[in-house]
Image (cartoon, rainbow, N blue to C red):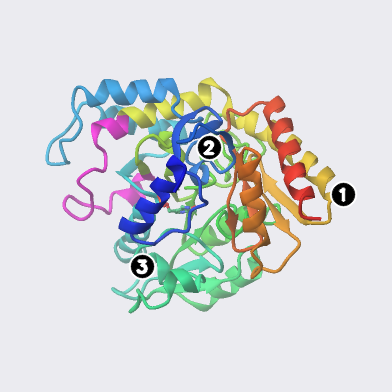
């Protein structure tokens, strides 16, 4: 073992559960769009921790808020009030245009929270008979890794041998409005429709223009809650504050020309700039008020550090106009990738919105070519990771500049050219 990286990888492999398959690179420092490994090599981060680090690594304003709060008070549990939580709750509800928020820590927890909230609403408000509520979900979804969430996963690796599974979910094809309408017409027991506005983990699948608005209208007509999982797509990633926002790249929230206003909005990841685990479920009173004291919660959810960090992280999105930047640079990135695809047959397809993008490599899902390409990107100073075999996601921090995007396009083409 000659490098520091090799020593540390060996340690993780020896003492850590093998529940991931990381690209062999050991990071110790980050700033903006860059990360450094323990041997001093510098890389562009083109994954942003699955769209958590939208504001860039170690943003001084967010880190400052965290340190300031951590020196005063870190945790009270929800047994008591704390001086930060109410301030965050007012800020985040006004930011996104909802009556109330329920704070949690991780994306999966927030999805679980939304599912529980939806079911309780179905029994207490809609009047579905106890234990009969069904929630519609989409094929190839990714919403996290709890037992309930994997119960409706298509990913056999994530699902197999973890049963018995949670009942009450109906799976339909994504981006298929007829399928949704048929299920809604067929059953009186539908409580909600859980959907990713763009399917991130599936390989950045962008639905047809108008799909979300039509789906929302159908849900409304059938008194079914439209639940948007914006854990990956939210917080300016797709060139909008939320992917459910309409053609408006402002950072002012969904009341501003919404394409779709979800009944329940799920946020995570970049709501804290990747600095601290924070997630949130937003809804109006008619829904959120079904949850009563003692019925749901978490020791760390709504802690004062999380609250202070999330306010700072959301302020950075507005201050630095990151939705606008994501939209503008996303167009430049996809144009550059499409030009590379003209010259290099390895790129089968380029897709995405804002700075949530993917290329599909011209090889089967079983091939390890995309992995080899990512290793070559790494050698040339750019970090990306394959998803579903032959797709490589390109999702840099939203603070990236045009010049840096062009530099990255050069790296990407050089690496791809090694394989033809
Ligand atoms: N929902 C979506 C759409 C996601 O992309 C993810 C994470 N990739 C999650 C939920 C789960 O978030 P976490 O890993 O924080 O539990």
> Tag 3, which secondary structure?
helix
Foreground tag (3 vs 2)? 3
Count neighbours of disc 1 (C-alpha within 10 A) and say few if under 14, some if 14 to 19, many if 20 or more: few
Foreground tag (3 vs 1)? 1
Mark seen at residue 342:
1
Mark seen at residue 148:
3
Residue shown at the point (52%, 63%) measured from the top left: 141
Dot 1 or dot 2, earlier in sequence: 2
Dot 3 or dot 2, earlier in sequence: 3
The picture quadrant where one finds residue 279 is top left
Foreground tag (1 vs 2)? 1
Residue shown at the point (66%, 26%) measured from the top left: 401
Indicate yes or no: mark 1 CB to ligand 1 under 8 Å. Answer: no
* Contact between labelled residues 2 and 1, with CB atoms less than 8 Å apart: no
Looking at the rendering, the stretch of residues picked out in magenta corresponds to 280-307
Dot 3 or dot 1, earlier in sequence: 3
Residue 368 falls left or right of residue 219:
right
The picture quadrant where one finds residue 69 is top left
Q: Residue furthest right?
A: 343
User: Magenta includes 148?
Assistant: no
Where does label 2 land, which residue?
A: 254
Count neighbours of disc 2 (C-alpha within 10 A) and say few if under 14, some if 14 to 19, many if 20 or more: many
| Camera-side residue of 365 and 182 | 365
């Amino acid at each position: 073992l000659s490098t520091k990286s090799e020593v540390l990888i060996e340690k993780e492999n020896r003492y850590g559960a093998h529940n991931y398959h990381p690209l062999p690179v050991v990071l110790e420092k980050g700033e903006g769009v860059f990360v450094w490994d323990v041997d001093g090599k510098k890389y562009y981060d083109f994954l942003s921790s699955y769209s958590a680090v939208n504001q860039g690594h170690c943003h001084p304003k967010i880190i400052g808020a965290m340190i300031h709060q951590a020196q005063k008070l870190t945790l009270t549990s929800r047994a008591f009030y704390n001086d930060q939580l109410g301030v965050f709750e007012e800020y985040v509800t006004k930011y996104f245009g909802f009556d109330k928020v329920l704070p949690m820590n991780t994306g999966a927890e927030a999805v679980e929270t939304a599912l529980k909230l939806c079911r309780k609403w179905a029994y207490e408000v809609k009047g579905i008979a106890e234990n009969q509520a069904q929630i519609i979900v989409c094929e190839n979804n990714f919403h996290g890794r709890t037992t309930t969430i994997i119960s409706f996963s298509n990913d056999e690796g994530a699902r197999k041998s973890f049963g018995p599974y949670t009942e009450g979910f109906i799976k339909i094809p994504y981006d298929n409005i007829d399928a949704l309408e048929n299920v809604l017409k067929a059953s009186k027991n539908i409580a909600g429709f859980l959907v990713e506005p763009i399917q991130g983990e599936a390989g950045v699948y962008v639905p047809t223009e108008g799909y979300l608005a039509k789906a929302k209208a159908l849900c409304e007509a059938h008194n079914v809650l439209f639940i948007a999982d914006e854990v990956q797509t939210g917080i300016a990633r797709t060139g909008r504050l939320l992917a459910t926002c309409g053609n408006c790249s402002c950072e002012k929230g969904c009341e501003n020309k919404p394409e779709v206003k979800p009944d329940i909005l799920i946020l995570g990841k970049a709501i804290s700039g990747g600095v601290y685990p924070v997630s949130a479920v937003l809804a109006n009173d008619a829904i959120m008020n079904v949850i009563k004291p003692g019925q749901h919660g978490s020791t760390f959810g709504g802690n004062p550090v999380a609250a202070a960090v999330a306010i700072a992280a959301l302020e950075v999105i507005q201050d630095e106009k990151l939705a606008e930047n994501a939209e503008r640079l996303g167009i430049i990135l996809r144009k550059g990738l499409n030009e590379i695809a003209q010259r290099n047959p390895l790129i089968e397809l380029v897709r995405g919105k804002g700075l949530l993008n993917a290329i599909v490599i011209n090889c089967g899902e079983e091939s390890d070519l995309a992995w080899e390409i990512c290793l070559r990107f790494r050698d040339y100073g750019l970090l990306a990771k394959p998803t579903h075999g032959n797709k490589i996601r390109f999702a840099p921090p939203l603070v990236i500049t045009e010049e840096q995007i062009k530099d990255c396009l050069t790296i990407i083409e050089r690496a791809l050219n090694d394989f033809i």
